[in-house]
Amino acid sequence: MDVAVIGAGPIGLYISSQLAQNGVDVHIFEEHSDIGNPQHCSGLFSEHIFSIVGTMNHRGILHPSSKARIVAPSGEALNIGTNVTRAYVVDRVEFDRSLARDAVRAGASIHLKERIRKIENFKIKSTRGEYRPRIIIGADGINSITRRAMGISAPKLISAAQVIAQYDYKALDTVEIFVGNNVAPGFFAWAIPLGDGLAKIGLGAYGNAWNYLKMLLKSVKGKPLSVGGGGIPIGTVKKSYARGMLIVGDSAGQVKATSGGGVYPGLRAAECAVQVITRALESGDYGEKSLKNYEDCWKRSIGKELSKALYIHNFYRKIRDDDFNNIVSALNRPDMIELINKYGDIDYPSKVIWKLFKKNPKLLKYMGIVTRR
Ligand SMILES: Cc1cc2nc3c(=O)[nH]c(=O)nc-3n(C[C@H](O)[C@H](O)[C@H](O)COP(=O)(O)OP(=O)(O)OC[C@H]3O[C@@H](n4cnc5c(N)ncnc54)[C@H](O)[C@@H]3O)c2cc1C
């Protein structure tokens, strides 16, 4: 076995298919018996994701999304977007399964219902056996065993809760975002239409996300049919490699702290992992110095945007309800909305923010929020 990938989420599956295509003997270990389940994602994906995974066909796309309605605590709504597609609502189970098909077709082996219990001296012990791969990749999510074996501290997590609910959404192409400290302190809530009178309604929060979600469901009259949730990493890990091992995706905190979106940054980091591991296997050098190239690569590729997202998050989480109301009002002008429509990008939110400050310098007074405790 050349490479053991722990975790058959989107990031582990993508890495595995790419490595297998390069002729590497890859084995993926997944503790669950069914790829994609249990799902813990709203499945709002930008086009950037499909440009990495190769095609949009058979990837579980339900419909395009082109607009957003942001609701302030006062009830004022900011409607942004045009008819141009901004993102796609995706069935995450189908998406993950499509990546699993790619991996298996490329020659990777998937060990379902085989949990990795221990990693020691470059050996992995699972519920079924023991293996000694040349390289171990931890794509094992927020509670990563690989990260623990590497002695790396976990990133900070906030709690997230989500339901699929019967919901009277505004329009199929419109995502609703609710902000405010009584709705989702430090983060935000969302309602993503699925069609057929159903939506994914969820939120992230500092505090107990379930309690806030129950209150939100009451106020928007959402009737839950199934529940899910998880944790959202806020900030990347201090180190993502060790001799013979690396971590990628949620396990390394490669998630946008602004939105909780982890699939795009995780895939960008996965591209780096594939390059560096392919080279390491060719040279036979799996030492720290060789695998450090992985961290250098993802920091160049997506690190700057993740740092900016963290900065924005730390600013955002200190915004009070009266500030939210004033900011939404300040943005609710045709020229500001035009700017958001022109430069808004869910994977690169920082691009538009500085432009908004420039256009309406009155917004700069909110910069003082950064210094709040
Ligand atoms: C409520 C919510 C909504 C979200 N919405 C979006 C969104 O709209 N868009 C977006 O881009 N991102 C979203 N995210 C984030 C996104 O789901 C994650 O960033 C993404 O799933 C990370 O992929 P991954 O492969 O790194 O980890 P995961 O998807 O968590 O996969 C890790 C896999 O490893 C397996 N595993 C763990 N430990 C072991 C072990 N010891 N042995 C064997 N297997 C193991 C797990 O079972 C799991 O299958 C959301 C997250 C939450 C919580």
Image (cartoon, grey):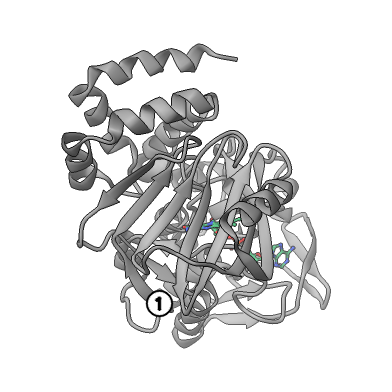
Give the image quadrant in which the ligand numbered 1 is located: bottom right
The image quarter containing residue 207 is top right
Identity of the residue drawn at 51% across and 47% down: 254
For the point 58% across and 70% down, the residue is 2
Q: Amino acid at mark 1?
A: Leu
Instruction: Give me the residue at 39% from left, 18% from top.
Output: 366
Q: Is residue 55 visible?
A: yes
Residue linked to disc 1? 62
Residue 21 located left or right of residue 32: left
Percent from the top left, x then y, of residue 145? 74, 54
- Quarter of the C terminus within the rendering: top right
Who is closer to the viewer here, 341 or 33? 341
Q: Is residue 246 visible?
A: no
Residue 330 % position (x, y): 30, 28
- The secondary structure type at the circle numbered 1 is strand
Q: Is residue 336 left or right of residue 270?
A: left
Query: Alpha-carbon neighbours of circle 1 within 10 Å: few (<14), some, or many (≥20)?
Result: some
Q: Is residue 72 above or below residue 144?
A: above
Q: Is residue 233 left or right of residue 347?
A: right
Q: Position of residue 174 (x, y in %)?
A: 36, 61
| The residue carrying mark 1 has its beta carbon less than 8 Å from ligand 1 | no
Q: Nearer the viewer, residue 333 or 96?
A: 333
Locate the N terminus by quadrant: bottom right
- Counting labels gives 1
